[in-house]
Amino acid sequence: MREFDGRVVVVTGGARGQGAAIASRLARDGASVVVGDILADEARAIVASIGDAAMFVPLDVGDEDAWRHLRDAAMERFGHIDGLVNNAGLLRPGTITDAEVGDLRAMIDVNLLGPILGIKHIAPAIAEAGGGAIVNTSSVAGAAGITGLTGYAATKFAIRGVTRVAALELASAAIRVNCVLPGRVDSDMSDIAGSRRDARGIPLGRVAELDDVARVVTWLLSDAASYCTGTDIVVDGGVLAGFGGRRA
Ligand SMILES: NC(=O)c1ccc[n+]([C@@H]2O[C@H](COP(=O)([O-])OP(=O)(O)OC[C@H]3O[C@@H](n4cnc5c(N)ncnc54)[C@H](O)[C@@H]3O)[C@@H](O)[C@H]2O)c1
C-alpha cells in the first residue's frame, strides 16, 4: 500500500519546475493527480510521463470560471478530490519605485488571488470526501525583504496569512492547510531572478533541487503531518536561520 493510494490531488503550475516534481512524486506514491496550468504543451508532456493516473485541465489560477471547470472535470474523471497544492507562481522583479502596476496586478492574480480561488472551489469537494490537505506556496521572500521583489514579496507574505485563515475555517471539515517557504530553487523562475545555480549565502552550500521541495510538500499532504495545520515550513538550506553561515 502506497501513501497516496486512492487519493486525488490537484496541483497548480504542474507543467514544469516544482509543480511537475510534486505531481510526479504524488503519482509515484499512489495518487491520481490533476495538473492545472496555462502551459498546455508542457503540462500534457508531464501528464503523459505519469500515465493514466494524471489528467491535464487548462487553468489560469486567477480565473474563477477556470477553477469551476477544473473541479468539475476532476470530479467527473476521478469522483472525488482529497488534496490541493497551490504551487503556480509568477515573479516579476521591480523595486518599490519602479514596479509596474501591470506586473504587480499579475503577481497578485497568480500568487494570491489564485490560491484563494483554488481553496474556495476545491475545499468543498475535499470536505465532501471527508477531509484532506491543502499546501500553499510562499517563499523566503514571504518572510524577509529581498530588494527588487516588491510585488512578489507582498504576495508571498500575504499567502501565509491566507493559509492561517483557511486552516481555522476549514479545520471543522477535517482539512489541513499549510504553507511551504522554499529558498532558491533550481527552476526556470530562478532564471528570471538571475540566480538559478547561485549558492552564495546559502548555509547548506547549494540551491534546492526540485525534489527537496516536493518531498516536503508531499509530507505535508500525507497522514504523517496529520496534526499540522495553519503553519509554515521553510525549505531554504538555512538562509532564514540568521547570519554567519557559509559564504561561498
Ligand atoms: N524558484 C524558486 O527559487 C522559488 C523560490 C521560492 C518559492 N517559489 C515558488 O514556488 C512555486 C513554483 O515555482 P517554480 O520554481 O517551479 O517556478 P516555474 O516558473 O518553473 O513554475 C511555475 C509554474 O506556474 C505556472 N503558472 C504561472 N502562472 C500561472 C497561471 N496564471 N495559472 C496557472 N499556472 C500558472 C507556470 O506556467 C509554471 O508551470 C511558485 O509559487 C514560486 O513562487 C519558487
Image (cartoon, rainbow, N blue to C red):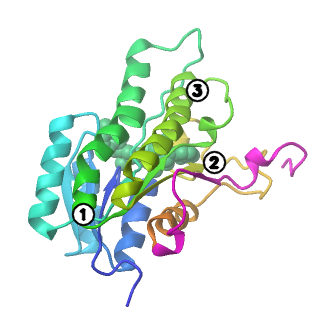
Residue holding disc 1: 81
Return the mark for residue 26.
Answer: none
57 lies left or right of 222: left
Q: Position of residue 22 (x, y in %)?
A: 42, 63
**Which of the 4 quarters of the picture holds residue 45?**
bottom left
Callout 3: CB less than 8 Å from ligand 1: no
Q: Does the image show residue 56?
A: yes
What span is colored magenta in the figure? Answer: 223-248
Q: Position of residue 131 (x, y in %)?
A: 33, 64
- The answer to whether the residue labelled 1 contacts the one labelled 2, judged by CB atoms less than 8 Å apart, is no
196 vs 185, nearest the viewer:
185
128 vs 194, nearest the viewer:
128
User: Considering only order in the chain, which callout, 2 or 3, is on the residue closer to the N terminus?
Assistant: 3
Q: Does the magenta segment cover residue 197?
A: no
Going by the numbered disc 1, the residue's amino acid type is Ile
As drawn, 151 above or below 22:
above
Residue holding disc 3: 149
Which type of secondary structure does the marked residue at label 3 adopt?
A: loop
Going by the numbered disc 3, the residue's amino acid type is Leu
Q: Does the magenta segment cover residue 227?
A: yes
Residue holding disc 2: 183
